[in-house]
Image (cartoon, helix red, strand yellow):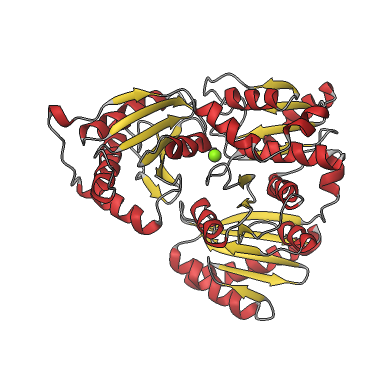
Amino acid sequence: MSGKLIISVSGVRGIVGEQLTPIAALEYACAFGKFLRETVTVKDKRIRVCIGRDTRRSGRMLASAVMSGLTAVGVDVIDLSVVTTPGVGIMTRHLGCSGGMVITASHNPAQFNGIKLLLSNGVAPTPRLLERIKKVYYDKSFDFVGSEDVGQLSFNESTDSNHIAAILKTVDKEKIRAKDLKVVLDCINGAGARVTKKLLKELGCCFVAINDEPTGIFAHPSEPLAENLGGLCERVKQEKAQIGFAQDPDADRLAVVDETGRYVGEEYTLVLAAKAVLRQKSGPIATNLSSSRMVDDITGQFGVKVIRTPVGEANVVAAMLENNCIIGGEGNGGVIDLRVVPVRDSLVGMALILHLIADTDKTISELADDIPAYFMIKEKFPADESQVQEVLSVATKDFSNAKIDTTDGCRFDFEDGWIHLRASNTEPVMRAIIEAKDRQTAEKYLGKIKQIRSKVVGSRD
Ligand code: MG
């Protein structure tokens, strides 16, 4: 046994058999079920929750525990089986459920798993509501119902068709079909394979899928980063494909490889998808404070506003709903299109990027090269909460010439770049995201942060 189960706004995460046991999953589901029963009014008085899972080997075991917990507190369950995270968001709304639960640890290694909660609108609970659920979980203040009130279990297999139908409304299918595009797809043996292949077929793409077995045995480290996608880059070249796509295990993140086999980078995913939407209509875009300045460049070109939010999908979605954003997301390859689902969705990202290729008649390398390039560094340093605060306060004095945003840690904007410093939500570290016009400038800013940090940590030792 090591460490505590982590419950954050992004969901529960833990190593299976250590922090994340069937008992923890069952009790967490009981807490969510009780919360829904107390807060939701449903006409027929039956609270329903749909459950989906990614392909991890522990998924079925944890899903069974979660279903037991929900039904034991009187909640009906609809089992969607293996589906993507955005798929659960779509079905929660489509089936009129009061909530959704996704069994996934996203891009974490295979020994991890997790549970993500969604409310009836497909959005994760706000931090305030999550605190209520956590309190029920820690106090174990839920009651089991008697035999006649036990929740009932049913199954539904229409997630893929609902997901694809929603996506097809956002793009010009015939225009994409007319291009006869060849795509290589790396699904990391995760939840995205089945539905993504159906979508690409619908879009008339000729595709080669690699790592597309739903085994949950990840063929490479599961974050869609350059260092993990050598196989995909090679295959795109070999197949003479127009584009390569990589998903993470629950298919909410998307990375792009161009026709020369070059990893374009996750930061480009949102920018390219945003460009596709902005060519169709005008409106604001929301993204978090750690996402690239490329988003400001593209919104600047189209004369629309960008709204910057604290890091975390729930924060971006809240800003999108509040400001009627036409698209939003995060620089980690997470595209959110409210026309489909208020959840990051690699499938809508793919469809929009394919639409952009068809609509502009440009290659993906040309489209990426049209966007001004920056150099980004993502670093993390061990730091407790008070050290993070000290670093932020020294940095605020040292960078007094910058434009400062303190919505989530501190973001310092300079003419030639920016720095975002914040405490991690999930581990005792400080994250530093630095982006500048070139490597040398980014490294200069990193050097300054390191100096400030050693001043703070040094003064403690
Ligand atoms: Mg994910």
Residue 323 occupies quadrant: bottom right
Q: Quadrant of the N terminus?
A: top left
Residue 114 occupies quadrant: top left
Residue shown at 72% from the left, 62% from the top: 296
Residue 89 x/y as whole percent:
47, 39
Residue 200 x/y as whole percent:
69, 26
Apparent side of residue 134 relative to residue 267 in the rendered image (left or right): left
Residue 128 x/y as whole percent:
35, 59
Residue shown at 43% from the left, 51% from the top: 9
Residue 52 x/y as whole percent:
43, 30
Q: Residue furthest front?
A: 43
Q: Please tell me in which quarter of the rendered image ligand 1 is found.
A: top right
Foreground of the two, 127 or 319: 319
Apparent side of residue 91 relative to residue 278 in the rendered image (left or right): left
- Please say if 168 is above or below 208: below
- Please say if 231 is above or below 100: above
Apparent side of residue 316 relative to residue 198 in the rendered image (left or right): left
Residue shown at 78% from the left, 64% from the top: 441
Asked if residue 236 shows in the view, the reply is yes
Residue shown at 69% from the left, 36% from the top: 351
Apparent side of residue 251 relative to residue 281 in the rendered image (left or right): left
- Please say if 275 is above or below 224: below
Foreground of the two, 97 or 138: 97
User: How many numbered dots are placed on residues in this image?
Assistant: 0
Asked if residue 255 shows in the view, the reply is no
